[in-house]
Every structure is written in C-alpha cells, then in structure tokens.
C-alpha cells in the first residue's frame, strides 16, 4: 500500500483515483437514469471545422469520449506503476516526472499498447470517415 502512496507514484495514484471517481460518478448517474458519457458526447459539435477535425482524431462519435478518457487514465496508471515497480526492483524508484514521461506516449490513442487494450470484438468501433462498421 505504501508503494501506491509514495511521492514518486503520485501522478499514477491520482490517475487511478480519477478513474475510480469517474467510474463511481457514471454508476451513480446510471442509477438515476442519466448517462454522463452521453452528455459529454452530445456537447461536442459534429461540424467540419478545426474542433471537429481534432475530435475526429480522438474518434469522437465512434468510441465515447468518457471511455477514451477512462482508458487513458487506466493505462497511464498501470504503465506508471509498472515502470516504478521495475525501477524499484532494479535500483530505486524514479522521480515522478521522470517516470511519467515514458508513460504518457505509451498511453496515447495511436500507441500499440492502447490499440491492443481497446481493440476487441466486444467493442467494435465506428469510423467517422467511412460511416461503416469496422471490427478490430
């Protein structure tokens, strides 16, 4: 337990707590008959402007934005804790900023680790460009 609360693991613990908070809020909203993820997705415009182009890179409209955010937070926390555990086993835990730098690119939407975790036949994605169903 001290490993998760250590100062060098703070960014990853904050990401894990945010993930748990989003999960709890979404469950509470679903019990009340409201979906936070749907409200967030409806807030984005489906226009062909700069913001729409940026949001299409995040695959908004195919995968709910809240799911992408939760995937990012979960991968960031897991990869960061693994980096700190390996560094602690080999020598000493890395400073928080040094450990967070390699964890950030590994959690991007275009990285192979994120594609492996998000590509499942249980969650088919829909492309904004082709408007047809794509299975991974």
Image: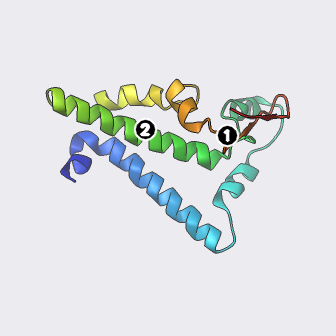
Identify which residue, 47 or 32, lies in the foreground.
Answer: 32
Give the residue number, with chain letter if any, for mark 1: 121
Q: Position of residue 47 (x, y in %)?
A: 83, 37
The vertical placement of 16 against 113, above or below, is: below
Is residue 128 visible in the rendered structure shown here? yes
Give the residue number, with chain letter if any, for mark 2: 76
Q: Position of residue 96 (x, y in %)?
A: 28, 35
In terms of image quadrants, where is residue 95?
A: top left
Q: Tag 1, which secondary structure?
A: loop
- Marks 1 and 2, Cα distance to the nearest angstrom? 23 Å
The N terminus lies in quadrant? bottom left
Identify which residue, 67 or 39, lies in the foreground.
Answer: 67
Q: Residues within 10 Å of mark 2 (few under 14, many from 20)?
A: many
Look at 24% across and 36% down and name the residue there: 85
Q: Tag 2, which secondary structure?
A: helix
Residue at the bottom extreme, as displayed: 32
Q: How many marks?
A: 2
Is residue 93 visible in the rendered structure shown here? no
The vertical placement of 124 against 111, above or below, is: below
Left/right placement of residue 89 relative to residue 26 reads: left
Left/right placement of residue 64 relative to residue 86 reads: right
Q: Position of residue 40 (x, y in %)?
A: 68, 53
Q: Position of residue 71 (x, y in %)?
A: 53, 43
């Amino acid at each position: 337990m001290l490993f998760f609360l250590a100062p060098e693991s703070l960014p990853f613990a904050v990401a894990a707590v945010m993930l748990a908070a989003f999960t709890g809020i979404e469950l509470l909203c679903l019990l009340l008959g409201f979906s936070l993820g749907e409200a967030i997705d409806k807030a984005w415009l489906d226009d062909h402007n700069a913001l729409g182009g940026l949001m299409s890179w995040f695959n908004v409209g195919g995968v709910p934005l809240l799911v992408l955010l939760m995937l990012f937070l979960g991968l960031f926390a897991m990869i960061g804790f693994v980096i700190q555990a390996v560094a602690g086993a080999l020598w000493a835990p890395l400073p928080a900023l040094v450990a967070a730098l390699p964890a950030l690119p590994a959690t991007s939407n275009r990285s192979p680790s994120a594609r492996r975790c998000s590509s499942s036949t249980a969650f088919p994605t829909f492309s904004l460009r082709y408007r047809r169903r794509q299975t991974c």
